[in-house]
Amino acid sequence: MENWADDGGRTYLRALPVLSGTAPGFDLNDAPNEPISLFVAWLHGAVDAGVPEPHAMTMSTVDAHGRPRSRVLIVKAVDDAGWHFAVSSASQKGRDLAANPLAALTFYWPALVRQVRVVGTVGSDGAAASAADFRARPLGSRAMALTLRQSQPMHDVTELDTELAKAHHRLSDEPNYVPDEWLSYAVRPDEVEFWEGSADRRHRRLSYSRADAGWERTQLWP
Ligand SMILES: Cc1cc2nc3c(=O)[nH]c(=O)nc-3n(C[C@H](O)[C@H](O)[C@H](O)COP(=O)(O)O)c2cc1C
């Protein structure tokens, strides 16, 4: 750390290991003709390998001015409709999605040297699914969501205490209450890329692109 100022940490960072996990092997000839089942199989592989929080994904969105932002979110479900997640429409990401219903998702499971990237259009799951998602959240998460202030500047922590107390009060009066702002969405994938790294840099990559009927599979250069 002492030489950090000399080179902005370049030497220190270069010495850190990368691609240090154990790749299970990715036989591209064996890959299914659609990406969902392969994603589910890789996710199970990550769970079995003990990857912490393997259902955490980096979601990137773009605001009305073309400014990109990324953040980590938990994926709620993955099925033929796509990758499902829920947000408050009052949050930055909620506003980004209202302006620009497109998102990119990135999963990285270091123990398996695997990454999956998804790009697609974002569509609502509807009011019933949004309400069901909200009601399934723990009480503390519901109360925090009800404050509708995520990512706003917080000038005084007592504001948070006050708003949270109001939210708990509301939920104790109306345990089934769901705010209109809570929205469940799905990323309907147009592109899904599976990447398995290799120490010799001959990484294995398979891209699925949505075609008229089904999916086109393309092997990519490392
Ligand atoms: C592991 C992990 C899981 C997270 N899960 C969520 C989540 O499910 N919902 C959420 O709103 N924020 C979640 N966050 C926080 C977001 O990354 C982000 O800070 C927050 O949503 C504000 O983003 P925004 O200002 O772009 O709307 C999570 C962060 C981490 C590190």
Image (cartoon, rainbow, N blue to C red):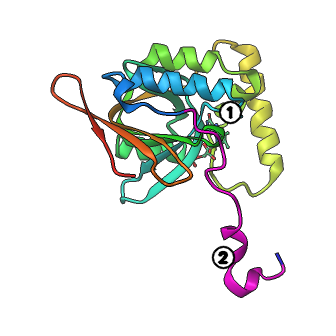
Above or below for 174 versus 123: above
Residue at coordinates 37% horizontally, 18% vertically from top-left?
Answer: 80
Secondary structure under badge 2? helix
Residue at coordinates 78% horizontally, 47% vertically from top-left?
Answer: 159
Residue 21 magenta: yes
Above or below for 65 versus 128: below
Foreground tag (1 vs 2): 2
The magenta span reads 2-24
Tag 2: residue type? Arg
Quadrant in which residue 163 is drawn: top right
Q: Horizontal and vertical percent for residue 73? A: 59, 38
Pick whichever, 152 or 47, lies toward us. 47
Pick whichever, 13 or 130, lies toward us. 13
Establish whether ligand 1 lies closer than 8 Å to the Cβ of label 1. yes
Q: Horizontal and vertical percent for residue 138? A: 73, 21
Residue at coordinates 66% horizontally, 49% vertically from top-left?
Answer: 20
Tag 1: residue type? Glu
Quadrant in which residue 160 is drawn: top right
Quadrant in which residue 216 is drawn: top left
Residue 73 magenta: no
Residue at coordinates 52% horizontally, 46% vertically from top-left?
Answer: 197
> What is the chief secondary structure element of the magenta stretch?
loop
Pick whichever, 126 or 82, lies toward us. 82
Q: Is residue 221 visible to us here?
A: yes
Residue under pointer 2: 10
Of labels 1 and 2, earlier in sequence is: 2
Where is the N terminus found, in terms of image quarters? bottom right
Residue under pointer 1: 53
